[in-house]
Amino acid sequence: MVDNAATLVASLQSALAEEPGLAHNPAALARRIREEAGVISDVEVLEILRRLRNDTSGLGLLEQVLARPGITDVVVNGPEDVFVDQGNGLQRAAISFNSDAEVRRLATRLAISCGQRLDDAQPFADGRINRDDGTSLRIHALLAPPSESGTCLSIRVLRQTNTSLDDLVDNRTLTRESAELLRAMIAARTSFLVIGGTGSGKTTLLSALLSEVSVDERLLIIEDTAELRPNHPHAVTLVARRANAEGSGEITMAQLLRQSLRMRPDRIVVGEIRGAEVVDLLAALNTGHDGGAGTLHANSLHEVPARMEALAALGGLDRTGLHSQLAAAVDVVLTMARQPEGRRLREIGILTGNPVTTEVIWSTDADPHPGYQSFRDSLALRTHVPRTHAPSEFEPRAVEEDAKPDAVTGNSNLHIPAGFDGSLDNFRTGEIS
């Protein structure tokens, strides 16, 4: 490699800025490299082209690890520490950056592509990048300082595949028995939460469950970062927005929840409950919007009441009010866990009483618990009771099967005005006013 490689790369980047067409003409770009570098080997030309690509497009050096099958996370803890997760925990990748400055350039470029600012005055940023292969990347960057180990990058790969419950059974995330129970739960319009730690598969399970919702229902999905992609023809996603560099333009989850109530939802879903929006969600679930759902960071079923109390306090709802709302709004909690063999549905629990208590009715490591059969029976009853609503002025009112025709007119739909005491023989059917 030529000794002044960094200077050459900087010069070529300036040339690309002035002549963007060079980026799409490798032969012309190689000629420019030879002109500016003088004597240079073919291997060195290829290395310069690689560095240019890494500094100007995609995820640079990290593209080669993102190409691996099953990648869910890539984390960079400074120039020499790159780790990847392919579903079995973080493992060190056999790549490294030349310097922290190289990592910082990549982090800054990614933040800018997300519409975020990243510099010494604003040393952290996060956002989302959509890629041509249909995946999305959730990016978080943290500069040094405050990081002691160098610039940090955390990249979550969000694959836009439509995972179904059958797919989750095939990869053993669910058992066939638990999948059938979950289908019955969706059909019965049961409100539920999916809990678990980071990367445990909460979003994947929730998306698969939403895909089971009847096609005649409208889903309103509220998220901080768009991740849910259910295979459903009538799903509308609303995404929160952070304030810009001037401190304006913020759209909160709580605001979006209030707007969703005016959008004729059949089910309201919160991608991740993490703040004061829990108050608005519980209020919505208690005002006729049954069948709602959300995810929550919690490691076990028994942590849910305390976790909800803490979040409700952010929205000004005290413990008594929270338990009253939660008891009426949420029926079921599904617990996901990351295990050595993969992501698994570990428990199904129900919320009972006021104050709310938790009860496990199904788990992977035991036979059905007490309460399992009664819960299944209750789902069957709710599933076979049709969802009713008051007929609007545009809907004809149904005639009761046992309605008897009027003895005089033979018309069971004839309306008799209040106080009328004349003879029906004076009127012809259809002309009574």
Image (cartoon, grey):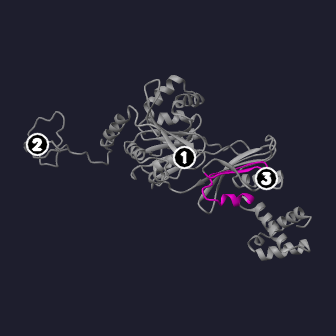
**Which of the two discs, 1 and 2, sits closer to the camera?**
1
Q: Between marks 1 and 2, how big is the CA–CA gap?
A: 65 Å
Q: Between marks 3 and 1, how big is the CA–CA gap?
A: 31 Å
Would you say residue 389 is visible in this rendering? no
The foreground one among 256 and 381 is 381
Q: Give the label on residue 343, or none.
A: 1
| Helix, strand or loop for disc 3 | helix
Q: Give the label on residue 406, or none.
A: 2
Residue 366: x and y in percent read: 44, 37
The answer to whether residue 72 is magenta is yes
**Which of the two discs, 2 and 3, sits closer to the camera?**
3
Q: Is residue 362 left or right of residue 73?
A: left
Question: What amino acid type should be assigned to the residue bearing mark 1?
Answer: Arg
Question: What amino acid type should be assigned to the residue bearing mark 3?
Answer: Val
For the record, the magenta segment spans 60-86
The answer to whether residue 89 is magenta is no
Residue 43: x and y in percent read: 82, 71
Would you say residue 287 is visible in this rendering? yes
